[in-house]
Amino acid sequence: MTLGIRKLIVLSIVAGVLLLGNLLMVATWLQEHGVIDWARHVRAEYLTGTAITIILVLLALMVRPGPVRASWLRRCSVCDHVVVGHGPYCSECGSRVQGPGCRGTC
């Protein structure tokens, strides 16, 4: 953990304590500026049970970007044969099978 991240954590904790200490003042300020009424309107109009369910399903279906993790089943890029295990060569055509971390240089 770097020094900058530690400083950010400490400042966040101090800001959180100050915010909790002045919670009534912050709530009054939000009420005066209409933020609470706006949030109620948004919740009533747009955050229905169906919308929340769809948002949660979409979040669950998201995949992490990046290279595919190692797998026991891979396909040869030349003959489309299924390669089982971590062997570097296809048993069908003999071409080199790219591994999960390969970026076309294998």
Image (cartoon, rainbow, N blue to C red):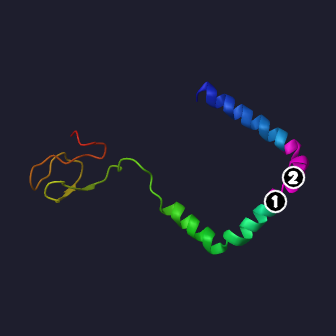
Q: Residues within 10 Å of mark 2 (few under 14, many from 20)?
A: few
Q: Is residue 39 magenta?
A: no
Q: Position of residue 72 (x, y in %)?
A: 28, 54
| Quarter containing the N terminus | top right
Q: Which residues are magenta?
A: 20-35
Q: Is residue 28 magenta?
A: yes
Question: At 10% from the left edge and 56% from the top edge, which residue is drawn?
Answer: 92
68 in relation to 51, above or below: above
Q: Is residue 37 left or right of residue 45?
A: right
| Quarter containing the C terminus | top left
Question: At 15% from the left edge and 47% from the top edge, which residue is drawn?
Answer: 89
Are the residues at dot 2 and dot 1 in contact (C-beta closer than 8 Å)?
yes
83 in relation to 66, above or below: below
42 in relation to 12, above or below: below
Q: Is residue 79 left or right of residue 60?
A: left
Q: CA distance from mark 2 to mark 1?
A: 9 Å
Residue 15 in which image quadrant? top right
Q: Which residue is mark 1?
A: 36
Question: At 12% from the left edge and 53% from the top edge, which residue is drawn?
Answer: 91
Q: Residues within 10 Å of mark 1 (few under 14, many from 20)?
A: some
Q: Position of residue 45 (x, y in %)?
A: 70, 71
Q: Which residue is mark 2?
A: 27
* Secondary structure predominantly adopted by residues drawn in magenta: helix
